Image (tube, grey):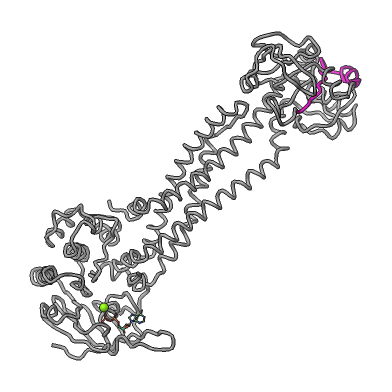
């Protein structure tokens, strides 16, 4: 069946390609950004939850996003926490965000006492090597090791000290880097301080009670249940969601404007064709339909290209940056597709209205 | 009633800046079913304007046009579009085919508009055969000669079986051999199928093909034969 809209797509190749590209980039931007955020939050949350502790005990003012923390508390609190009814084990941890620059930069380091960490559930599983023993021993997880080409017995400099990689861990539990607690405390010049305590309860049913007991005994201090960590993290990451919404809105706006411009130039260029349609007796609705169909066809091709581009970006990023996780969910694929369609549809409304209301004779005589 | 088209005291004024151009003045005209009428006159005398008024493409400044008794000034833009769609086939000097579509698709568009998307392929073949181009269905306009393009345009005007064909200088862009082909095609359509045709031309010679000749000058009809 003859379709003027589709025939015109192949006639104006550059315009068609630019419009398709605009929509494809819109889709890719949305999917990759959302996927990146989701992937990162998911990764952070699941690593904390995989430790197996029941409660995170945090100093006043601290954020549950551990890498943002600058607050410390005295290690002596440990004894009082252990003494609390229902608490089975406590593990003090010092966290430190490595410098953004350099090989292992941008990662959180946990300073731990291996035995205590083990007691709260943190079963660190070695893939090779041994656990922390010496003062400057370091454990790294498999993904970090692969990303930075680290092997057993390699030397890594952190806080002006040379550490030796003594073990490679299975990824996905706690931090990607572990060193002894005292070493990190000394390096930071905070010998008796820690960033948080992981708390293990005597039975899972008591977790809620224990948490409120702790908050009562230590006014101002905070407890974060491991079970709800993912949820709470997502909520405290609202700023990120606003940022995503802003970028998404801009992406939609840009592709809306590109489609608008493309369709507007199209109808100017094809004014005479619109005049012919009018002479043939096409109603306004028919003309609107023709222009909107063309824009929607452009959008659909753009959306499909955007999907391909997104998956290509996902594959490429996970190869180039092994520590990055991008999660592209079916619901976001559908949502991004709908947004692409809507922006294409809206972008064609004004041009199609202009086309439909042209004067038939003037349109026909247009040079 | 055999009256297909009636123009009553038809007038059209274009306002350009502060000057009024009276393109058509006080035209009275009747076209009966089965007639082949030519309107002839020098360039700029208002022929195209008159044709646009008769076909409901433009609104008159004064007077009225009736198509099969329907007063075009009393109906909406949309209803005028439907009159064009259902009752009128336009043929233009510049052919006005869709350049991205082949002959068959050009006819399909006209059919789509008229029949809500339904396409009668058999009818398209028949009409293309009628204009002698049954072997050019898949050709795009630029792959056809000018004479052939105009015959495709005539086929497109015919495809919905219009009450009236309005042809505005259909031979204006053609050499004499092709002009004759087109004029005799129109003549055949009128004779054999009883197709009602109004032919507009500035060429006295071409106007003779019609059964009735109307002469125009300065927007007015100066003689009816
Ligand atoms: N849209 C317009 N605006 C102003 N003047 C016009 C317009 N269309 C036609 N005219 C004028 O009206 C007169 C009749 O034009 P037209 O109907 O095209 O004549 P013809 O078809 O006989 O050559 C001419 O003087 C022409 O310049
Ligand atoms: Mg003219």
Q: Is residue B44 above or below residue A162?
A: below
- In the displayed structure image, the side of residue B196 where residue B116 appears, left or right: right
The answer to whether residue B194 is visible is no
Count of marks overlaid on the render = 0
For the point 72% across and 22% down, the residue is A175
For the point 78% across and 26% down, the residue is A96
- In the displayed structure image, the side of residue B203 where residue A2 appears, left or right: right
**Residue B127 is inside the magenta segment:** no
Residue B44 % position (x, y) = 27, 83
The answer to whether residue B6 is visible is yes
Quarter containing ligand 2? bottom left
Q: Nearer the viewer, residue A90 or A256?
A: A256
Q: Is residue A46 above or below residue A13?
A: above
Residue A319 % position (x, y) = 55, 27
State which quarter of the image contains the C terminus of chain A.
bottom left
For the point 17% across and 85% down, the residue is B214
Location of residue B101 by image quarter: bottom left
Q: Is residue B186 above or below residue A240?
A: below
**Residue A84 is inside the magenta segment:** yes
Residue A232 % position (x, y) = 72, 33
Please give the range of residues in magenta: A75-97
Q: Nearer the viewer, residue A225 or A76?
A: A76
- In the displayed structure image, the side of residue A332 where residue A180 appears, left or right: right
Location of residue B84 by image quarter: bottom left
Residue B132 % position (x, y) = 11, 60
């Amino acid at each position: 069946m003859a379709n003027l809209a589709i025939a015109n797509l192949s006639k104006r190749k550059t315009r068609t390609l630019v419009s398709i590209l605009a929509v494809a980039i819109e889709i890719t931007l949305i999917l990759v950004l959302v996927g990146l955020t989701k992937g990162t939050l998911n990764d952070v949350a699941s690593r904390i939850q995989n430790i197996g502790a029941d409660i995170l005990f945090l100093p006043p003012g601290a954020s549950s996003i551990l890498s943002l923390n600058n607050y410390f508390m005295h290690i002596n609190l440990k004894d009082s926490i252990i003494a609390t009814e229902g608490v089975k084990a406590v593990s003090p941890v010092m966290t430190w965000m490595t410098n953004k620059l350099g090989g292992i930069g941008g990662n959180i380091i946990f300073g731990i006492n291996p035995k205590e960490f083990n007691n709260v559930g943190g079963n660190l599983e070695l893939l090779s090597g041994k656990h922390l023993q010496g003062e400057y021993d370091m454990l790294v997880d498999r993904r970090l090791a692969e990303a930075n080409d680290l092997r057993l017995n390699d030397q890594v400099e952190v806080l002006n000290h040379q550490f030796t990689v003594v073990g490679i861990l299975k990824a996905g539990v706690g931090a990607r880097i572990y060193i002894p607690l005292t070493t990190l405390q000394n390096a930071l010049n905070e010998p008796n301080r820690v960033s948080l305590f992981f708390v293990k309860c005597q039975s899972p049913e008591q977790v809620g009670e224990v948490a409120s007991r702790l908050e009562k005994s230590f006014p101002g201090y905070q407890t974060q249940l491991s079970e709800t960590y993912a949820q709470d993290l997502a909520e405290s990451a609202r700023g990120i969601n606003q940022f995503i919404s802003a970028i998404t809105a801009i992406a939609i706006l840009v592709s809306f404007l590109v489609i608008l411009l493309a369709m507007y130039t199209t109808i100017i260029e094809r004014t005479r064709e619109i005049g012919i349609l009018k002479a043939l007796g096409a109603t306004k609705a028919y003309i609107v339909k023709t222009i909107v169909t063309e824009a929607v066809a452009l959008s659909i091709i753009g959306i499909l290209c955007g999907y391909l581009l997104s998956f290509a970006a996902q594959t490429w990023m996970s190869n180039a940056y092994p520590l990055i996780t991008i999660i592209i969910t079916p619901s976001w694929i559908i949502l991004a597709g709908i947004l692409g369609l809507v922006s294409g549809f809206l972008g064609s409304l004004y041009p199609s209205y202009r086309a439909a209301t042209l004067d038939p004779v003037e349109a026909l005589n247009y040079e | 009633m055999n009256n297909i088209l009636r123009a009553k005291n038809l007038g059209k004024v274009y306002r350009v800046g502060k000057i009024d151009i009276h393109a058509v003045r006080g035209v009275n005209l009747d076209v009966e079913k089965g007639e082949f009428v030519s309107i002839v006159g020098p360039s700029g005398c208002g022929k195209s304007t008159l044709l646009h008024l008769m076909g409901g493409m433009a609104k008159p400044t004064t007077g009225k046009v009736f198509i099969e008794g329907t007063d075009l000034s009393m109906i909406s833009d949309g209803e005028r579009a439907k009159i064009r769609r259902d009752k009128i086939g336009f043929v233009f000097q510049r052919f006005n085919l869709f350049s991205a579509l082949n002959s068959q698709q050009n006819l399909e568009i006209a059919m789509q508009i008229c029949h809500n998307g339904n396409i009668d392929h058999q009818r398209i073949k028949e009409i293309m055969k009628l204009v002698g181009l049954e072997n050019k269905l898949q050709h795009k306009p630029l792959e056809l000669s000018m004479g052939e393009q105009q015959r495709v345009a005539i086929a497109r005007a015919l495809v919905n079986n219009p009450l009236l064909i309005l042809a505005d200088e259909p031979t204006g862009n053609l050499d004499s051999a092709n002009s004759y082909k087109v004029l005799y095609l129109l003549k055949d359509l009128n004779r054999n199928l009883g197709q009602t045709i109004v032919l507009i031309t500035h060429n006295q010679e071409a106007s003779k093909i019609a059964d009735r000749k109307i002469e125009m000058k300065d927007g007015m009809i100066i003689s009816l034969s």
